[in-house]
Image (tube, grey):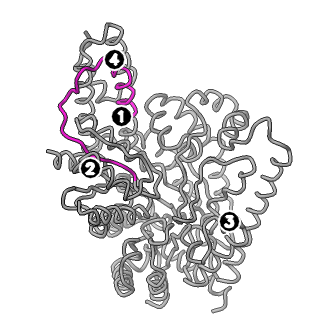
Amino acid sequence: MNNEELLAYRQQIIEDAIRMKKKPDRTPHFANYWTWKILDSGYKLSEALYDWDKLEDSTIKFQKKYGFDMLVDDGVRDPMQVIEPIGQSSYEVDDEKEIMNIRDVSFMSPDDYDLFLKDYPRFLWEVVLPNKANRFNSDLTLEQFGEVFNRFNGYAKCTQNIVSRLNTECGTPAGMLSTQSTIPGYEQLFNFYRGIKGTASDMRRIPDKFKAACDLLDEMQLYPALEQLKTSTRRANASVDFIGLMLGHTILSIKQWEAFYWPSFKRMLDAVVAADKTCYIFSEGSTKRFWSYFKDLPKGHFAFHVEQDDIFEFKKELPNCCAVGGMHASLLGGGTKEQCVSYAKHLIDELGGEGFILSQDKMISYRNDTNPENLKAVCDFVREYR
Amino acid sequence: MIDFERLKTAMGELDNDTVVALLEKLMAEGGEGADQALAACQEGMNTVGDLFESGEYFVADLIFAGELMTQAMDIIKPAIVASAGGNVGKMLLCTVQGDMHDIGKNIVKAMLEAGGVEVVDLGIDVAPEAIVKAAKEQGVKVIGLSGVLTLAIDSMKATVEAFKKAGLRDDVKILIGGAPVTGEYCSYVGADAWSLNAAKGVEICRSWLN
C-alpha cells in the first residue's frame, strides 16, 4: 500500500470499528502517547517543547517507528512557548528527571464571576490574561506582546506540518488537534479557569454563579459548534467526525454530574447522533459511575477511551459503544515482549471485531511508562494479526 | 453554647455557612466548648467519609470537606486546649519525587487528621532519602506515598528501596495511593497496600496505627 492507500485503509478500519456494522479488516490501534514521544526520539523535553522543528520531528519519527493507526496527541498539546514572552505559570519542565508537570492553577477568583457573566471579553482581558501570563502588565512592550503572535504562527504551522506529514509520509489520519472538537462549559471552567480545587469549592459555595458561567460558555461556544456539526463534513485527513473530551467528571458526584455536566454533554452526544457522525470521547480516569447514562446511546456513533475501568466490563455493559484501550502501561513498561504481545492477542481475540480499538490505558508520558521494544512488538503484531 | 449536634450535621452536609456561623459564635462567646466543637467537626467528617463510601459524595466533596475542615480549625484553634477525638498515632505523608500534585494527598491528610491521626506532611516532590530521614527522625511506622503521574510509580519503588537500604523496611508499613496505582503496580513497587480512594486509604492507615 502506498501512503494514500494506507491512510484510506486506516480511516476505514477505524470507521468500521466505531460504526459496528461490519468487522474491520483488523483491529485499529490508537497511540495514547504524549511526551514519551519526545524522549523516545532522543530529544530532551525542553529541546522539543521549545523548538517547533524538533517537536515535529519527534512526532514523525515516532509514527514512522511504530506505525499506529491514529495518534491521539498529534504532538503539540503543550504549546507553553507561545505565551512565554508574556509569562506562563502552569508548566514546569525538568530535563534531568524527564518530567513535565502542569500545575493546578486558577486564573480567576470566585469574586470574578460577576464580571465573567456581565462582560466576558473584558473578563478575559482584565482578569484571565494578567493571571495566566504573569508579565502581562503595564511594563509589557508591544514587541513582547507581538512575539506571542509570532510564536502562535509557529505553533499553527507546526500543527499543519505534523498533520500533513502524518498523512503524506506515514499514511496516518489526524488525531485530537486536527479533528473538529469542542467541550462543555463545565470542562472549560475546570480545565482553563478554576482548576480542580476552585471548581470543587465553587460548586459548593456559589453553585448558581458556577452554573451560570457553565451555561454562558455553552451558549457562546458549545452550542454554535454543535449547530455547525449538522452541516459540516468530515475533514479529509481525519478518521472520526468529532472528538470530545471527558476530563472533569473525575471529581464529580452523581448529583453534581447531573447539575453541571450531563445536560450539556448529553446535548453534545445527541447532536452527534442527529447528524449521524462518529465521535471519539477521550475520557480520563474512571467513567464507570456514568455508564448508565450512555446505555441508550444508539450503536455506531461513539468510541470511549477506557483508562481505569475494566475494558471487558465496559464492553459488556455498553455493547452499543466502541471501547478504546485495554493495553496496560504497567505491562508495556515492566513486562516482556512476549507478555505484551500475548496480552494484545488476548484483547483482540476477546474484544476484536467491531466495537474495539486497541490503545493504552494511561496517557503515556514518562520514559518508564513503556519499553520501546515492547511497544514495537505489539505494534508489529497488531498490524499483522487477523 | 452552640448546638454541637447541629455543627456535626452541618459539617457532614458540607454546609459551609452554618459551620462557620456556629464556630464564630462559639469564639465570640469566649471559646468555651472548642474541644467539643472540634470533636463534632471530626464526627461530621466521618459522615463525609461514609457518604463517600456510599457513593453520594465524590472527590470534589472531599476536596471541599478538607477546605472546610481547615477553615473550621483556623477559627477555633486559639481556643483548643486538648486534642479531641483521641490521638490514634502518627504517620508520614507526601507526594513522591517528580510529582507536584497535592490534592489527593491533602484530602487524605484532612480525613486522617479528622480521624485523630497526627500527620507529618512532607509536601510534594519529596525524594526517597528525605522520606526515610523523616521517618527515622519522627519515629513513624506508617508511610503514605501519593502520586498522580505514572512516573510516581518509579519514585514509590525507589522510596521502598530506600527503606530497604536503610534497613527499615520491616519496621514500616507503606501505603501507595493515587490515580495510576493498581494492584500490579503495588507488587512492582513492593508496598504493603494500595488505594485509589482517600476513604479506603484512611481506613488502611488507621488499621495499621491501631
Type of amino acid under label 2? Gly
Q: Position of residue A22 (x, y in %)?
A: 47, 79
Chain of the residue where label 1 is placed in the rendered structure: B
* Callouts 3 and 2 in the same chain: no
Residue A384 magenta = no
Q: Label 4 is placed on what type of residue?
A: Leu
Element class at badge 2: helix
Q: Are marks 3 and 4 on the same chain?
A: no
**Residue marked by disc 1:** B65
Could you confirm whether marks 4 and 1 are on the same chain?
yes
CA–CA distance between discs 3 and 4? Answer: 60 Å
Query: Marks 3 and 1: in contact by CB < 8 Å?
Result: no
Which residue position holds label 3? A233
Q: Which residues are magenta?
A: B66-95
| Residue A384, placed above or below residue A316 | below
Q: Is residue A296 visible?
A: no
What residue did someone put label 4 on?
A: B23
The amino acid type, in three-letter code, at marker 1 is Ala
Query: Viewer-proximal residue, A290 or A377?
Result: A377
Q: Is residue A270 visible?
A: yes
